[in-house]
Image: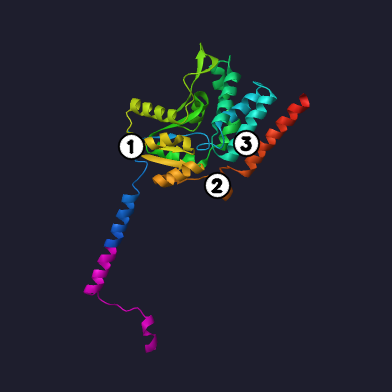
Amino acid sequence: MAALGWLTPRRRSATARSVLAGEASAEAARKSTQEVSEREPEFPVPGDERAAAFFDLDNTVMQGAALFHFGRGLYKRKFFDTRELARFAWQQAWFRLAGVEDPEHMQEARDSALSIVQGHRVSELQSIGEEIYDEYMAERIWPGTRALAQAHLDAGQRVWLVTAAPVEIATVIARRLGLTGALGTVAESVDGVYTGKLVGEPLHGPAKAEAVRALALAEGLDLSRCAAYSDSHNDIPMLSLVGHPYAINPDSKLRKHARRMDWRLRDYRTGRKAAKVGIPAAAGVGAVAGGTAAAIALHRKRR
């Protein structure tokens, strides 16, 4: 039995060495916790009224491009013909497959949208935008990005969408998500009717940074305490403007830049392939590609 004595716990008084060991361990734990706290300060900071968050829309907050989803809704309401639908569907399929914004495609989409809405009342498009959000956009909101936006709201901070999409669409989405508001491309209107022209240029690339800078000045924000979120390297000017830039579902150029600058990254796309090429979901791509083929086939049949 004596041989098994080591199995039996013994009561021993603390020696000087054991006291020293305990104190050293406690101090190391305290320092470790303090170091982690210093490396990862609480963010968003609750109650910081001079901080805000700015979110890109397409492929950051929502899968795909808002303008293309809006185009689908307008086609359903007979705003344009099948040929335009095929073009919208192809541009959307390309955007989802490539995971980046092609300037030529985006310009074509904007030109198409402007020609489609010309002569229509702004109030009419705003009302239709509410319906289109429910039909095509609501289910495409990234839950992860939505949670990030909500964290800022819960901290008492303002949150804006910043997008090249028409401001009317962006405002609908922002309101539905409970955000503060939206910065978007402004289409010219006279007496409440669209003229088919833009006011200035699309809110894209450097223009986004200028919009954020102007809003921050008007709202009394400290940009060094603000955050910005985007998927595209085109938004590096906006991301570089704030103290807390995030790359969300980043394209390859933004991913490389973010790693070089030690920016935080979040990727909510599913699958290894999706993470590489920016495909939100294989089923979604198949649906868009199928829709493109169906639209083209229908167009040929009617000719």
Amino acid on which disc 3 is placed? Ala
Pinpoint residue 246: horizontal percent, then vertical percent.
43, 41
16 relative position to 139: left or right:
left
Residue segment shown in magenta: 1-26
296 relative position to 177: left or right:
right
Q: Secondary structure at mark 3?
A: helix
Residue at 41% from the left image edge and 27% from the top image edge: 211
Residue 249 is at least partly visible in this image: no
5 relative position to 110: left or right:
left
Asked if 41 appears above or below 216 in the picture, the reply is below
Residue assigned mark 3: 93
Nearest the viewer among 155 and 141 is 141
Residue 302 part of the magenta segment:
no
Residue assigned mark 1: 224
Determine the image quadrant of residue 223. top left
Residue 25 part of the magenta segment:
yes
Residue 138 badge: none
Q: CA distance from mark 2 to mark 1?
A: 31 Å
Asked if 81 appears above or below 274 in the picture, the reply is above
The residue lying furthest to the left in this view is 16
Residue at 39% from the left image edge and 85% from the top image edge: 4
Camera-nearest label, 2 or 1: 2
Dominant SS of magenta comes to helix
Pinpoint residue 117: horizontal percent, then vertical percent.
58, 19
Amino acid on which disc 1 is placed? Ser
Pinpoint residue 201: horizontal percent, then vertical percent.
48, 23
Residue assigned mark 2: 276
